[in-house]
Image (cartoon, rainbow, N blue to C red):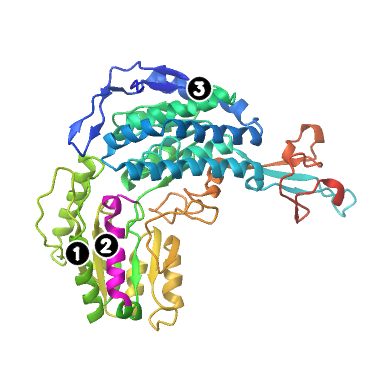
Amino acid sequence: MITGKNYIGDKLSSDSSVSFKTFNPLLNVENNILFFEASDNEIEKSTKLANDAFKKFKQVPTSERSIFLNQISDELKLISDDIVKIYCSETGLSEARCLAELTRTINQLKSFAKLLLEGSFQEVSIDTSIPDRKPVQKPDLRRMLMPIGPVVVFGASNFPLAYSTAGGDTASALAAGCPVILKSHPMHAGTGELVAAAIIRAAKKTNMPNGVFSNLNSKGIEVGVKLVCNSYVKAVGFTGSLKGGRAIYDLASKRENPIPVFAEMGSVNPVLIFPNKLKKEYAELAEKYAKSITIGSGQFCTNPGIIVSFESENFSLFIDKLVEEIENISPSCMLHPNIHKSYNDGLENIKKNKNVAFLTKKDLKLNDNFPKHVISTVTAKKFIEDKNLQHEVFGPSSLLVRCEDKDEMLDVIESMDGQLTGTILAYENDEFLTQEIINALELKVGRIIFNGVPTGVEVCPSMTHGGPYPASTDSRFSAVGTNSIKRWLRPVSFQDFPQNFLPDELKNSNPLSIERSINGITTRNDDSDFKI
């Protein structure tokens, strides 16, 4: 049952007089359940509880944290029918999309549970002492990554499961040993409460400290602002707009004790198409990219918002085919009237530019919150001149940029800000594809794709979901995959410590049998092979 209340640890609470309802964009009506925004008192209680829980949770063995994460996934499976019902009513998305996202969420939890047993994420390094080294003896030094403290996670509007309550940020933070205070997204607060209750049940069943997880509702930005500024909070995870992510980053940096913000923000994900590929596959590429641009109403952070190629007959054929394909795809419901309005506002801003031509002309009578699919085009010169054309338009649209030659394509790439992805559509022997272009694109993105589509983010250790600003606030880290756990860890070195006071990960005997570097040699063995 959904109560509309906040979870302060394992207790439900509703102190505030501020309330709100979620919205069904498909029916274009408010849902019935009333949700209560977290009060200042509830914010303070949840953060203090998380701080107290951290002292215990960071000491919980990784094997037990693994059991906790697996239990969360089990609890989610048990309530999958309930999740589908509320998810669809709050998003306008289909049951199939919900189940796919729920499966991804569960698999993410399981992948972090497995990582905890394997142990290499802690990057244990041991350099043993050399007492008789001249002129100065070498100390015994042992280093590992340790949890940073309570983490605030902001739920994402476009992924109510995979990037929200029990999503990648939460799963990776809990795996790291960090309690989580979840700032629930107001567009899917009911989905958030159901998932939060599952996490709380899992915490109780596996004897995790109370306060390891809290779920706070919010109608506007106030709760998020207060959480970011709270002294108990040691890091923030965010997925959303550039405006929102930058505001959080600025708040965190102005604190008396600044904290890291790992925000995944705006990206237009440029796609470069080369001549030989166009000549032989323009129709297939147009069909593939029409689907990529419109999937999920274009509400993916990896939506291909910019497509770049050379002025040619084949590019013209591709453009015509892309317009045809995209106009034949039925529009689907966007997540919320506010998102639909922002999308239309973004298109209107582009329309004000007299150098941009809108190519999709089909006049459709659309239901409320259903967007028009839009393809527009501009020359490379005008694209480079106007930075406004490089801003993300969150929805099913793409701007096609026409270059005169390789040098102009290079100028287009170099004019762009940081991106999550960059895609190359080419044959390996295409004379227009140079190492210089590849190197320029590499400097701008977190993931380079060859002959694929950017939509679809595989969850695995080799995935990088981040990139230079404004794609993310810290390009050294990924928001997806098991390596995302490193956002919530910090290195600590122990010098000349007695064995009985060392963490198990650093003891000579390696009781956890994890992978470690000992005097530069990687091994899972204990001290029998080394002079320690």
Real-space CA distance between mark 1 and mark 3, rounded to the nearest whole angstrom:
51 Å
Residue at image point 85% right, 51% down: 529
- Magenta span covers which residues? 281-300
- Tag 3–tag 2 contact (CB < 8 Å): no
**Amino acid type, callout 1:** Ser
Q: Quadrant of residue 3?
A: top left
Real-space CA distance between mark 2 and mark 1, rounded to the nearest whole angstrom:
13 Å
Residue at image point 48% right, 55% down: 464
* Left-right relation of 480 to 425: right
Q: Quadrant of residue 509?
A: top right
**Amino acid type, callout 3:** Lys
* Left-right relation of 480 to 336: right
Label 2 or label 1, whichever comes before in sequence order: 2
Element on which disc 1 rests: strand
* Left-right relation of 522 to 452: right
Label 1 or label 3, whichever comes before in sequence order: 3
Q: Which mark is residue 290?
A: 2
Please say if 328 is above or below 36. below
Label 3 or label 2, whichever comes before in sequence order: 3
Residue 224 seen from this side:
no
**Amino acid type, callout 2:** Ala
